[in-house]
Amino acid sequence: MSMRFGGSDSGGSGFGFGAPRRDEPEINLIPFIDVLLVVLIFLMLSTTYSKYSQLKINLPVANAEAPKEFPHEVHVGVSASGDYSVGNEALQGRGLRALASALRASARGSGTPVLIVSADASASHQSVMTAIEAARLVGITQVTFALQSPTPGSD
């Protein structure tokens, strides 16, 4: 029968003076799984809110009657060169005062006229703004712009 002293199983002498016993390294997976779960939740939440979607708008429906009285319309044309016409008459001058007096004469006798600006696509921005300023001086507060629909295949 053999007796052991020192409680060492490392072989060698029975007194435990040999190389110390090394434990196998152990990987604890529970903190690793916790960290992965947090990253997964973060990714799920962040990708849910970054999704691009189109606006889906349902416009309201109104059964309004057509107006029985149409407002008086004052038409102003602006050419590419900056010339003006009120109604169907071309103006001699290009100034603000000449345009305002022509608008005043055309809007006379109507309650609240509407100015319709028909400007050439190549007309300068200043020419269009002069027409709007003349309407403001005369007291015309409602201004709209005329346009034409593009013809198919004209891209």
Image (cartoon, grey):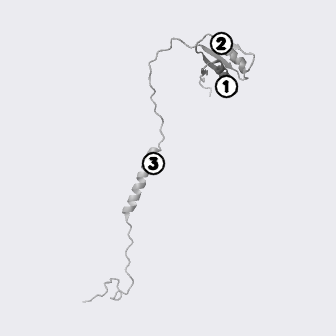
Q: Earlier in the sequence, mark 3 or mark 2?
A: 3
Disc number for residue 46 = 3
Left or right of residue 36: residue 77: right
In x, y percent, where is residue 48?
A: 44, 45
Comparing labels 3 and 1, the label whose residue is closer to the camera? 1
Disc number for residue 129 = 1
| Viewer-nearest residue: 90 or 33 | 90
| Amino acid type, callout 2 | Ser
| Viewer-nearest residue: 117 or 102 | 102
Q: Is residue 44 above or below residue 19?
A: above
For this orientation, the residue located farthest to the left is 1
Q: Is residue 22 above or below residue 109?
A: below
Could one spot residue 86 in this view of the protein? no
Q: Quadrant of residue 135?
A: top right
Q: Which residue is located at x 69 percent, y 18 percent? A: 100
| Amino acid type, callout 3 | Ser
Q: Earlier in the sequence, mark 1 or mark 2?
A: 2
In x, y percent, where is residue 103?
A: 67, 15
